[in-house]
Amino acid sequence: MTDHDETDEAMRPEEVIQDHELERAEEPAVPEEPSWAEEPSRAAEPSQAATADRSEDVPQPGEPGQPGGPGQDGKPRQAEAAAQTGEPKGAVTASVRKTATRRVAARSTPRKAPVASVARRAGELAASAVVPPVRPTTLAIDAGGTGLKAAVLDAAGKLVADRVRVVTPYPCPPKALVDALAALTAPLPSFDRVSVGFPGVVRKGIVLTAPHFVTRTGKPGEPVVGKLLAAWSGFDLAAELAARFGCPVRVANDADLQGLEVVSGSGLEFVVTLGTGVGTALFLDGRLAPHLELAQHPFRKDQTYDEQLGDAPLRRIGVKKWRKRLDEAIADFHRLLNYDRLYIGGGNSRLLAGHLDPSVTIVDNIAGILGGVKLWELPED
């Protein structure tokens, strides 16, 4: 690797990162409206055409061709009417005007549907709009180094409730994480199973490494706290969550979970996530390879990819220099893996639009949730 990159601590004024560029894509503790949500059905309201005053459509006395108005010859026809009815001229005129007035009033008064029938129809429409989710339903959790996110998905991978998010608590021993996830998901509807994306190496639901959670604040490169390291090493996260939620639980690396949602299933495909730290996942013809913590390998200046490309260095050195580092990392990964396709996700991937080779696919961060259903399509460990 090369060490010719910029000086990290010395940022030129023009390269100072803008707040609006680095603002987190999601704010904590605010439920989000899913794009699929439909408004509740409402009873149809009378249209403007139905309620508008239609008196202008009623022929008025004195108009051409109408009783009391001139005929085709322009002469009054009251005499004709009087002759036909045998009534005085004045009586005919009053009768005609009274009849026209009644017609105007009848047509200009809006008709109202009975209140009871409108309410009943609204209830029927609302009931018909509620479609039960296709089971089994999955509680999908993305346990990130910065935020904990969760949503319930149906069997087709569609959201059946608003996605929820809270800030990851620190220090974060296992019990703190489990308690935080239980509180986060309490408002969500019921589910049949749970999928968890975890920022570390997990095998058969047991945590082998937890780079963020073994430090005091979760930032890459921070000193490891001995008690946290001991607590997380070998912790059976799947079993603990299964006991808490009362249903089956599967846990996988968070980048692996995101990759399950986005890969095409053909050739060697590589997934990189950019957030608090860096995550990686590798797939061959759609099959997930054993997880390799490539982000923990040395990259530059005796630091790992995680330490050089995480959120903290991005804020310190600025977007321009951070992008330059990422280009160098991508070249390293390609030399190492010779992958066919590259996908880049995570919260900071939004800073890369228009700055990458067109062959690179930028992945929406929601993929870390949506991959939860596909985790259950894999064979059991």
Image (tube, rainbow, N blue to C red):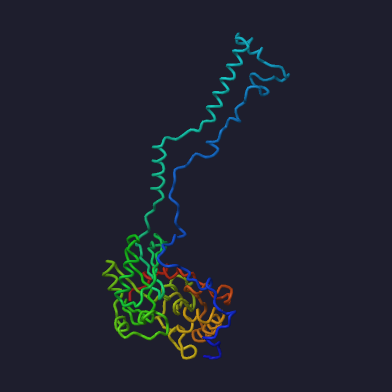
Q: Is residue 375 above or below residue 83?
A: below
Q: Position of residue 58 (x, y in %)?
A: 60, 27
Residue beneath the point at 52% across and 73% down = 19
Image-quadrant location for residue 360: bottom right
Q: Name the residue: 52% across, 40% down.
A: 47
> Residue at point 47% right, 74% down?
346
Q: In this view, does 74 lie above or below 144?
A: above
Residue displayed at 53% across by 72% down: 21
**Can I make out residue 310 in this image?**
no
Residue 195 in the image, given as x and y percentages of width and height:
36, 70
Q: Going by the picture, which residue comes out furthest to the front?
A: 13
Evaluate whether residue 72 shows in this view. yes
Q: Where is residue 32 in the image (x, y as percent from the top left)?
A: 43, 62
Where's the C terminus, which quadrant? bottom left
Quarter residue 243 falls in: bottom left
Q: Nearer the viewer, residue 58 or 131?
A: 58
